[in-house]
Image (tube, helix red, strand yellow):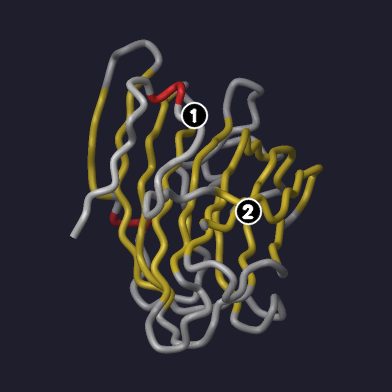
């Protein structure tokens, strides 16, 4: 078996790769921008075209004050008529106070689900201060597969009341062998005041 190599001495000068060398790339499928939106739903573009999909959350900002406003999602197998797929999930979080008075890392038991159709939280509680909010990424794997369950991994950075930065990590699976073809996002209390969500397919 021969080995393909790049002969360029600098990666910056590479104009093409030899046959057999490839990498993944993101294809932007949809962009939605919130404006006091109760939900943001992606009801098209999630199909058998790609084996992996990526959601990017950019400056998600809630309308309500307080610390119980969690950014959440749910899956649909009927093109968005219902968002109620059973999920089993896990959640961990790391935090750091702005004044450096406290740090921590823990398993977030109240943030997980066990065969529940509830919406899954992917942030800590958010406040509507202008210096608060959340950004992050969620990966959805092979949603059109009709043999296996549907795995996801989400990771976000957020600021909650008290000026505490949280790195929130959640993962799990939608326990269905039906194709997932829609995903909905919302804030657990109030609306999504502003923010952008982008959907990509992974080549």
Labels 1 & 2 near each other (Cβ < 8 A): no
Q: Residues within 10 Å of mark 1 (few under 14, many from 20)?
A: many
Q: Residue 156 lies in what quarter of the image?
A: top left
Q: Is residue 197 above or below residue 117?
A: above
Foreground: 79 or 98? 79
Along the horizontal axis of the image, is 54 left or right of 141? Answer: right
Residue for point 62% across, 57% down: 185
Instruction: Look at the numbered disc 1 and give the secondary structure of its residue.
Output: strand
- Which sits earlier in the primary sequence, circle 1 or circle 2? 1
Q: Is residue 1 above or below residue 118?
A: above
Q: Residue extending furthest right? A: 35
Along the horizontal axis of the image, is 58 left or right of 178? Answer: right
Relative image position of residue 165 (x, y in whole percent): 41, 27
Q: Quadrant of the N terminus?
A: bottom left
Relative image position of residue 51 (x, y in whole percent): 48, 68
Q: Is residue 76 above or below residue 28?
A: below
Circle 1 is placed at which residue position?
159
Distance from the alpha carbon under mark 1 to that under mark 2: 23 Å
Q: Residue 97 lies in what quarter of the image?
A: top left
Q: Residues within 10 Å of mark 2 (few under 14, many from 20)?
A: many
Circle 2 is placed at which residue position?
199
Relative image position of residue 39 (x, y in whole percent): 71, 57
Residue for point 63% across, 38% down: 60
Foreground: 58 or 162? 58
Instruction: Look at the numbered disc 2 and give the secondary structure of its residue.
Output: strand
Q: Residue 179 lies in what quarter of the image?
A: bottom right
Residue for point 64% across, 55% down: 186
Relative image position of residue 40 (x, y in whole percent): 71, 56
Mark nearer the viewer, 1 or 2:
2
Residue for point 23% across, 42% down: 106
């Amino acid at each position: 078996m021969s080995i393909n190599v790049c002969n360029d001495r600098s990666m910056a000068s590479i104009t093409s790769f030899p046959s057999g060398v490839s990498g993944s790339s993101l294809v932007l499928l949809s962009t939605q921008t919130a404006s006091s939106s109760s939900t943001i739903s992606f009801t098209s573009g999630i199909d058998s075209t790609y084996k992996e999909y990526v959601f990017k959350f950019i400056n998600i900002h809630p309308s309500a004050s307080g610390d119980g406003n969690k950014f959440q999602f749910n899956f649909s197998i009927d093109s968005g008529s219902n968002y109620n797929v059973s999920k089993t999930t896990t959640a961990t979080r790391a935090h750091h106070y702005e004044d450096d008075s406290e740090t921590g890392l823990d398993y977030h038991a109240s943030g997980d689900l066990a065969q529940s159709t509830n919406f899954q939280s992917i942030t800590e509680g958010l406040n509507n201060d202008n210096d608060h909010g959340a950004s992050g990424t969620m990966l959805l794997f092979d949603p059109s597969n009709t043999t296996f369950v549907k795995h996801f991994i989400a990771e976000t950075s957020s600021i909650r009341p008290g000026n505490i930065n949280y790195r929130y990590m959640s993962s799990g699976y939608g326990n269905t062998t039906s194709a997932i073809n829609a995903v909905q996002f919302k804030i657990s209390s109030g609306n999504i005041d502003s923010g952008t969500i982008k959907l990509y397919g992974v080549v």
